[in-house]
């Protein structure tokens, strides 16, 4: 506020510099934005458009909003009925809850298994960390589908696991694992575990081990050290990992289809039915749009709280 | 109608096709360069030498892709600009819908010298969905019935129980006994509901929601004993002995039988077209409206209609073809297999699927999802 | 109770006996025995790699000794984990918990001993005011300057009022000005609180300024333990003499001893040197005479200095408050001699190439074994 006395010339120079700075900044931030617009916003707008149209037996199998009627008039027909259908039919709501349940439990399982693994890798001797991380990533080198088929071979009634347990004499009748929700959880947890481990590893490896010594020095036992120091600081990694697991599992189709039993009702399968079996692209699109909103709301809320916490910090400084 | 469970099989098929393409690229040099034709067919639905022979004879290079469900094909057709010259949908309800949606172009029969080899009875059976047989050219046909593990089922149900019946998958009293051994139904609302109605002795051409509900009640009663609903997994599960009874396509069950025989694992599989009535289906060739190589597509169709060629395919894939001139050329084992060429008595009870309206499809699929998930 | 008090009088606060720590095949700490008295400011001084930090970490409980025992207050703590020791540490990197506010950092140790809320808050306030950062309690560490962080680390380590506070290079990360100011604050704090401070430092000036006692370490062993004054005036080895301050060393041989006067014949010095020394010496024994540069002065007419020599000024290092002269003797030996700059620059009497006579009293130098 006191800077106005500084002379117009200096001010103009400052402005020019600021402008140059902002142009550079626009270039740098522009590329990810462009990416987001082309590969996220535009496709989503297409989906939104289809979700508001009416299905038809034609190519493509829906009607455009803007249509020319027989007498040469142009009419615009927007159909919100597809969203109404999703709301009215309890099937979609229960599929949403089915997906939420599978996603939540799998995320928890991934966290329970992935956290100790990420911790162990982060605390391993430096020369062992890269090989251990490679082992985590290694399954990606094989087709996802083939890996799920391998699980079918393991979990089948006559599969490797049952034969092994029978041979050991632990069980007398083969276990019914294949085509149950247990098989889905095993498959999903297996497939998404690396997505949990990698961000966790990233945060845990940055954690300064001296902080644990400081906590011990101040009287905290190992369990307390973990709860008060390691865990709170790894929360960003936990959130990142949980998102990377939760979001794709919400829309997961292949694993429940191949490993799951008849009673697994998930949005992915329902979307498949709408799209392929019912040929109802508008309803399938409406479902996709709703799923996106369901997933994006907690994400935005999180961002909101994070930026508010940051703003608070700035203010204090 | 062919379904192969494994993506691996698809990958292997792709490699085989590419490999043969390479081998015959050399010999194609001898013939005049005739361009190409893009074929989109079911996986494992052609003989291993059909394409290479065509290429070396005509000089037309074939780009051959495969799918494993009508729905996948249909979605690509509806999206448009698929780039394919020939596709192989199942006549009902798929090709029927596609014709009405205007997805295909009429066949130019002046280019099809071998058209006369086709079975007039089958052509006639398609006339109601394709008047004058303008768009669709029949390829293979088969039934949907029951595949079973002979020894295990007999052990559980006794030797006296007839096995050519829908009771094996719908009668709660029987399914419950087979449950531990494993029973599967196809994940296909139309197929299952029609079969359920046949089991109850109800008219099978009624697709009203009341009729669908009756069928759904039948399935619901058996559902607790059904291990899974899937339209292709049963092939390997039957062959491995993981499943005792499967509702499935004739050719797929026979493929499971052959696999078990090859593996020599003591699993003995048989196919039965149920006495209450098995669903009969026909797969047809069609040329998409936006096909880039229409002339070559006709050349390929004409080639396929040669009795030696199509007999070779039948021998290879174990399905009956729609070419009457080829019957004498089909191997005896195939021709005399009642699962492939059923006796006249069985044929009399065949159920021909109708094409339900869109709202009927929606309500059937909704009902189907509820029944499957037990909600 | 009486018993304990009686014991405390004869028992040092920290008693280290035959302590060793081996990493791989190298001895980081090699058979050290050391007593540390209560309420002092004790420094572990040495260059990097001398084992001082390892020793401190064994006191804190972060390293397990390979051999030997540590007693604190008469109790063997060798096998106690860090969280069961009445000892707190201020880390070189400060190790502040980045996800907690300053107040929560300070309260952390108190929470671990389940101190009730009101008392805890009161103690945190006391600590904040003790290190003069009353207003920073709600900030996060990343919002603080280096000096402020150092104060938080100190407050956190002091909050539990431990018997012993361990400080690992407490001033290492501060700039020079701040460091000098903080040195005095640390000393004042120690005197006010009566807590025993054990400080690791590589900076001899820092050790000299703050400590009541210094243990000079070298290659895992203790070279000398003494008060800063004695350490400076009476170093017991060439290493100690060299490490702390500047020193001139003349190698020679004992030629005679009469009373407390020892005569040393030194070729380097160009003749006999006379040293006041009360311990009996063996004639013919090789010995080194050590004299600090500031103990030397220029010989003036009528001076009766027992140790005198002539040399040529080769280099002059002007430091502002004083200058260091490097004087080359006839033997080629260079002698360092400092002189306070009482006069202004223009009037400096000494210059390069000038020949000057230097000398010192017999009681201004010492003898070191070779």
Image: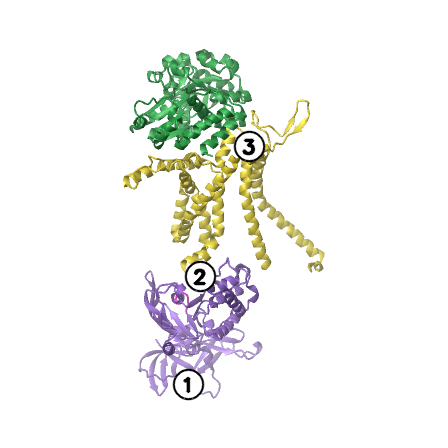
Residue to which mark 1 is pinned: C306
- Where residue B12 appears, as percent x and y from the top left, is 39, 29
**Which quarter of the figure has residue B29?**
top left
Q: Where residue A79 is drawn, which disc sits there? A: none
**Which quarter of the figure has residue B188?**
top left
Q: Nearer the viewer, mark 2 or mark 1?
A: 2
Tell me which numbered mark, 2 or 3, is placed earlier along the sequence: 2
Chain letter of the purple region: C
Chain letter of the yellow region: A
Q: Nearer the viewer, mark 2 or mark 3?
A: 3
The answer as to whether the residues below labels 3 and 1 share one chain is no
- Where residue C168 appears, as percent x and y from the top left, is 44, 66
Q: Is residue A77 left or right of residue B39?
A: right
- Where residue B15 appears, as percent x and y from the top left, is 40, 29
B175 or A4, nearer to the observer: B175
Q: Is residue C316 above or below residue B273?
A: below
Q: Is residue B210 above or below residue C189?
A: above
Residue to which mark 2 is pinned: A215
Per the image, label 2 sits on a secondary structure element best described as helix
Q: Is residue C21 above or below residue B201?
A: below
């Amino acid at each position: 506020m006191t800077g106005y006395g500084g002379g117009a010339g200096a001010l103009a120079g400052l402005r020019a510099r600021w402008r140059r700075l902002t142009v550079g900044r626009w270039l740098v931030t522009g590329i990810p934005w462009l990416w987001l617009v082309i590969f996220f916003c535009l496709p989503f707008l297409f989906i939104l458009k289809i979700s508001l149209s009416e299905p038809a037996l034609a190519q493509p199998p829906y009607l455009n909003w803007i249509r020319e009627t027989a007498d040469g008039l142009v009419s615009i027909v927007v159909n919100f009925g597809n969203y109404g259908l999703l709301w009215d039919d309890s099937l979609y709501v229960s599929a949403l809850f089915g997906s939420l349940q599978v996603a939540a439990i799998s995320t928890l399982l991934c966290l329970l298994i992935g956290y100790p693994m990420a911790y162990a890798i982060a605390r391993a001797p430096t020369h062992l960390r890269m090989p251990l991380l490679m082992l985590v990533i290694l399954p990606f080198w094989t087709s996802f589908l083939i890996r799920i088929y391998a699980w079918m071979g393991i979990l089948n009634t006559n599969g490797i696991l049952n034969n092994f347990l029978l041979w050991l004499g632990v069980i007398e009748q083969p276990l019914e694992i294949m085509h149950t929700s247990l098989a889905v959880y095993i498959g999903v947890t297996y497939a998404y575990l690396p997505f949990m481990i990698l961000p966790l590893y990233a945060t845990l490896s940055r954690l300064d081990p001296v902080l644990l010594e400081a906590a011990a020095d101040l009287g905290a036992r190992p369990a307390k050290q973990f709860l008060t120091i390691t865990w709170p600081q790894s929360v960003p990694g936990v959130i990142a990992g949980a998102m990377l697991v939760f979001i794709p599992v919400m829309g997961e189709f292949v694993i429940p289809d191949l490993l799951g039993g008849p009673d697994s009702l998930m949005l992915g399968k329902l979307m498949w039915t709408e799209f392929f079996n019912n040929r109802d692209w508008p309803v399938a699109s409406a479902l996709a749009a709703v799923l996106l909103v369901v997933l994006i709301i907690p994400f935005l809320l999180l961002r909101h709280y994070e930026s508010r916490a940051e703003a608070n910090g700035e203010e204090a400084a | 109608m062919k379904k192969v469970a494994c993506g691996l099989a698809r990958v292997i098929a792709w490699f085989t096709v590419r490999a043969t393409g390479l081998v015959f690229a050399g010999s194609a040099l001898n013939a005049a360069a005739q361009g190409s034709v893009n074929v989109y067919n079911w996986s494992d639905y052609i003989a291993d030498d059909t394409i290479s022979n065509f290429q070396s004879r005509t000089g037309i290079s074939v780009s051959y892709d495969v799918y494993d469900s009508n729905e996948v094909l249909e979605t690509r057709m509806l999206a448009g600009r698929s780039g394919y010259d020939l596709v192989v949908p199942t006549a009902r309800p798929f090709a029927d819908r596609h014709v009405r949606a205007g997805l295909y172009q009429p066949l130019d029969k002046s280019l099809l010298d071998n058209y006369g080899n086709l079975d007039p009875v089958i052509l006639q059976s398609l006339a109601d969905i394709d008047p004058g047989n303008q768009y669709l050219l029949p390829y293979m046909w088969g039934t949907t019935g029951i595949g079973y593990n002979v020894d295990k089922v007999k052990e559980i149900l006794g030797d006296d129980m007839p096995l050519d019946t829908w009771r094996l998958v719908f009668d709660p009293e029987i399914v419950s006994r087979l449950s531990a051994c494993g029973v599967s139904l196809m994940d296909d609302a139309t197929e299952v509901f029609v079969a359920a109605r046949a089991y109850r002795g109800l008219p099978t051409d009624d697709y009203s929601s009341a009729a669908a509900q009756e069928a759904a009640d039948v399935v619901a009663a058996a559902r607790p004993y059904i291990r899974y609903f899937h339209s292709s997994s049963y092939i390997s599960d039957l062959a491995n002995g993981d499943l005792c009874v499967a509702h499935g396509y004739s050719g797929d069950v026979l493929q499971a039988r052959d696999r078990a025989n090859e593996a020599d694992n003591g699993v003995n599989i048989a196919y039965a077209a149920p006495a209450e009535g098995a669903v009969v289906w026909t797969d047809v060739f069609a040329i998409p409206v936006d096909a880039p190589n229409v002339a070559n597509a006709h050349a390929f169709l004409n080639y396929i209609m040669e009795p030696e060629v199509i007999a070779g395919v039948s021998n290879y894939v174990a399905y009956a073809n729609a070419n009457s001139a080829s019957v004498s050329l089909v191997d005896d084992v195939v021709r005399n297999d009642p699962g492939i060429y059923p006796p006249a008595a069985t044929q009399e009870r065949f159920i021909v699927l109708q094409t339900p309206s869109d709202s009927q499809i929606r309500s059937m699929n909704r009902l189907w999802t509820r029944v499957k998930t037990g909600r | 109770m009486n018993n304990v008090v009686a014991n405390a009088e004869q028992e040092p606060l920290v008693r280290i006996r035959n302590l060793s720590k081996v990493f791989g095949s190298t001895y980081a700490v090699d058979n050290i025995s050391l007593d540390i008295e209560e309420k002092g400011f004790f420094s572990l001084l040495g260059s990097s790699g001398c084992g001082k930090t390892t020793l401190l970490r064994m006191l804190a409980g972060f390293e397990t000794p390979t051999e030997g025992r540590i007693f604190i207050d008469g109790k063997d703590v060798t096998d106690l984990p860090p969280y069961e020791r009445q000892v707190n540490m201020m880390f070189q990197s400060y190790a502040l918990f980045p996800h907690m506010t300053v107040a929560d950092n300070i309260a952390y140790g108190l929470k671990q001993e389940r101190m009730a809320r009101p008392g805890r808050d009161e103690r945190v306030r006391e600590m904040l005011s003790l290190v003069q950062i009353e207003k920073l309690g709600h900030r996060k560490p990343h919002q603080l300057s280096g000096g402020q962080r150092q104060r938080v680390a100190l407050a956190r380590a002091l909050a539990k009022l431990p018997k012993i506070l361990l400080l690992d290079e407490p001033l290492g990360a501060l700039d020079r000005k701040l460091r000098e100011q903080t040195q005095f604050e640390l000393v004042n704090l120690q005197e006010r609180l009566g807590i025993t401070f054990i400080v690791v430092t590589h900076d001899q000036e820092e050790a000299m300024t703050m400590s009541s006692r210094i243990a000079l370490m070298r290659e895992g062993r203790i070279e000398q333990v003494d008060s800063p004054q004695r350490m400076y005036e009476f170093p017991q080895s060439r290493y100690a003499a060299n490490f702390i301050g500047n020193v001139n060393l003349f190698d020679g041989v004992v030629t005679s001893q009469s009373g407390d006067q020892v005569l040393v014949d030194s070729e380097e010095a160009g003749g006999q040197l006379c040293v006041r020394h009360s311990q009996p010496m063996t004639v013919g024994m090789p010995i080194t005479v050590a004299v600090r540069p500031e103990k030397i002065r220029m010989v003036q007419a009528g001076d009766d200095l027992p140790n005198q020599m002539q040399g040529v000024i080769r280099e002059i290092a002007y430091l502002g408050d004083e200058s260091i002269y490097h004087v080359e003797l006839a033997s080629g030996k260079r002698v360092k001699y400092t002189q306070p700059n009482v006069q202004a620059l223009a009037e400096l009497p000494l210059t390069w190439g000038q020949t000057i006579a230097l000398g010192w009293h017999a009681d201004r130098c010492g003898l070191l074994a070779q």
